[in-house]
Amino acid sequence: MTGATYGPDGAIAGFINGSGGAAAITNLFSYNKRLQPLAMSATFGSPVQTVFSISYDFHLGNGDNGNVWGITNNKDTTRNQSFTYDALNRVIAEWNAGTASEPAAEISIPPARERDFCYLNSCRNW
């Protein structure tokens, strides 16, 4: 990795993978004012070819509470994803550009399990 650059907040803004020249892959990252990712991309060659490029939608300025509302695949739009949430910010539906909405009941989420928590030789089951 070479040529790492950072934003004013210290978050990585870009770097180059590879030994340089046409085979080197340039990675770029951008963030919104809440430091949430806006876009990520990887390109190489001359002319430039895109290997990977995605953008995120957090509804910045319109109900942005940290939930990802959409992920846009700028290289293959059939792989775009969208999400909706209930009042408790739980995913209630997700879909991609090639499918209809999937109710949350059909999303494979493992059931909650109890966990043991120990601190100073005192354990509790949560």
Image (tube, grey):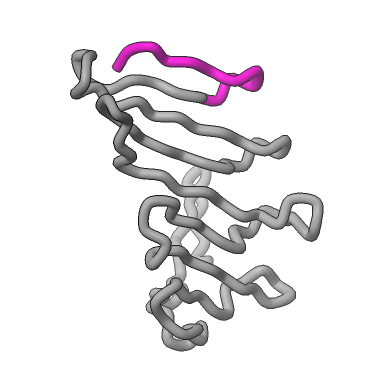
Q: Which residues are magenta?
A: 1-12
- Which quadrant of the structure image shows residue 9? top right
Q: Is residue 121 above or below residue 32?
A: below
The N terminus: image quadrant: top left
Q: Residue at x 56, y 33 (%)?
A: 30
* Left or right side of 97 for 60: right
- Which quadrant of the structure image shows residue 19? top left
What is the x, y in percent for residue 61? 80, 51
- Which quadrant of the structure image shows residue 90? bottom right
Q: Is residue 16 above or below residue 124?
A: above
Q: Residue at x 71, y 57 (%)?
A: 59
Residue nearest the observer in this picture, 76 or 3: 76
- How many dots with numbers? 0
Q: Is residue 5 magenta?
A: yes
Q: Residue at x 44, y 72 (%)?
A: 96
Q: Residue at x 39, y 75 (%)?
A: 110
Q: Is residue 50 above or below residue 76?
A: above
Q: Is residue 25 magenta?
A: no
What is the x, y in percent for residue 68? 59, 58
What is the x, y in percent for residue 108? 38, 78
